[in-house]
Image (cartoon, rainbow, N blue to C red):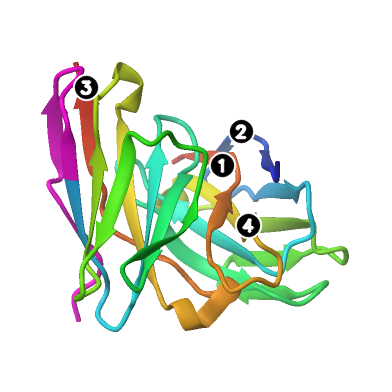
Amino acid sequence: DAGVTQSPTHLIKTRGQQVTLRCSPKSGHDTVSWYQQALGQGPQFIFQYYEEEERQRGNFPDRFSGHQFPNYSSELNVNALLLGDSALYLCASSLFAGGAGTEAFFGQGTRLTVV
Amino acid sequence: GQQVMQIPQYQHVQEGEDFTTYCNSSTTLSNIQWYKQRPGGHPVFLIQLVKSGEVKKQKRLTFQFGEAKKNSSLHITATQTTDVGTYFCAGPMNYGGATNKLIFGTGTLLAVQP
């Protein structure tokens, strides 16, 4: 039973470029949430996808966008990269039906460095 | 907005000593979850507490949810080097809502000296 998989594991981009990160949720899960974790801080919620729609969004600019596919996998896109976007991007999968009490399973993350 | 704070930010202990981290939310939570993140790793779910005053144990780890459901604690008895990492508490953003948008605490980094 595969857990949550993310790709790539590491990425270096230049300011102003665009990046796409990918996530495959744990088998049986239908909800994908994305988090940004800066060094030494806790994960910050970016947005959540369920039934191919963005359901919740955190305090992130429109440069951050996403998509969920029919197979529940998801992409996170960041446009016009800034140095401050350098962080570990985590994908978490869960079951939407579980509601507020659902455990989140995290992928290993994508380490994005913007230079 | 809703905030979740943890203290201390950092704790250095000798192996065998006890360790406690405290979590406080600005709002009432429907449940509290605890995660452990090893250095260079990703958060791994430890446990979820739902009921007011609930206490759960996992071997040397004891988790408690406050009566008002706004605070929680994690206590580790007789720490081992394998306990090293950052411990995060996290609560759902919308109390009672059908969402698991998690607000993470600031985390406590535990260092254990052999």
> Which-is-in-front pick, marks 4 and 2?
4
Q: Is residue A39 left or right of residue A89?
A: right
Q: Residues within 10 Å of mark 3 (few under 14, many from 20)?
A: some
Sequence-first tag of 2 and 1: 2
Q: Name the one closer to the observer, A40 or A43.
A: A43
Chain that bears disc 1: B
Secondary structure category for the residue under label 1? loop
Q: Vertical placement of B5 versus B16: above or below? A: above
Amino acid beneath label 3: Val
Mark 2 touches mark 1? (CB < 8 Å): yes
Q: Which residues are magenta?
A: A1-20
Is disc 3 on the same chain as disc 4?
A: no
Q: Is residue B5 visible?
A: yes
Place residue B59 in its image quadrant. Answer: bottom right
Place residue A31 in its image quadrant. Answer: bottom left
Residue A58's spot in the image, x, y percent? 51, 45
Chain that bears disc 3: A
Amino acid beneath label 1: Gly
Amino acid beneath label 4: Met
| Pointer 3 residue | A114
